[in-house]
Image (spheres, helix red, strand yellow):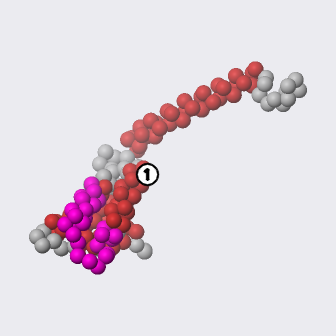
Amino acid sequence: MSERNGRVGSHPRLRVGLGAWLCCGSVLLVSCGGALETTRRHTYAPEFNYITDSQLQSAMWQLAAGTSSLDKLLATGVPVTLEERQSVIRILQNMETAAASLGPDGWPSNHPRIAQNIGRFREQLAGARRNVQLDPPSYYLAGTISGACHACHGGE
């Protein structure tokens, strides 16, 4: 503390040093984002499917929301209306899109459980959607989607 006015940082050199440190720190933070991506490109083989945390969280949240919506629509015990049928088809299509964002089936990935199970899960989603689109529709497979999540999220 300065004895003159009792404030910390009132010395001109201290303020300049602190300002320079903050400026350099923010430049480093901004440049690190690009450096991480460059490092990742050189660290993983081109055929390696690197799933970022934000991609994973986004896709998984979309799949979880879809599963919850399907369960709410199909667990009522009453016949499904035409409007609800269209909702089930739309939910399954959105889930297929979210699952597709997790990368190709069987490719090496930083999430081996996803790489190992995503193909089977996509097939279950597509089969469920096709069965709901039949005339008359079958909702059985759509009702089992939450159980399909057990492949990755179930017990060991």
User: Residue at position x 28%, y 65% from top?
Assistant: 121
Tell me where residue 119 sits by quadrant.
bottom left
Q: Quadrant of the N terminus?
A: top right
Q: Nearer the viewer, residue 140 or 78?
A: 78
Residue at the right extreme of this rendering: 3
User: Residue at position x 31%, y 65% from top?
Assistant: 117
> At which x and y percent is residue 156?
43, 74
Q: Is residue 100 visible?
A: no
User: Residue at position x 49%, y 33% from top?
Assistant: 31
User: Residue at position x 38%, y 41% from top?
Assistant: 41
- Relative to 62, is 125 on the left or the right? left
Question: Where 29 sits versus 126, above or below?
Answer: above
In the image, the segment drawn in magenta is 70-97
- Residue 75 part of the magenta-drawn span: yes
Residue type at the position of mark 1: Asp
Q: Is residue 44 visible?
A: yes
Secondary element type, mark 1: helix
> At which x and y percent is residue 102?
32, 54
By secondary structure, the bulk of the magenta-drawn segment is best described as helix
- Relative to 111, is 129 on the left or the right? left
- Relative to 22, is 41 on the left or the right? left
- Relative to 146, is 18 on the left or the right? right
**Residue hosting label 1:** 53
- Crowding at dot 1, Cα within 10 Å, few <14 / some 14-19 / many 20+, comes out as few
Tell me where residue 57 sits by quadrant.
bottom left
- Residue 62 part of the magenta-drawn span: no
> At which x and y percent is residue 109?
35, 55
> At which x and y percent is residue 30?
51, 33
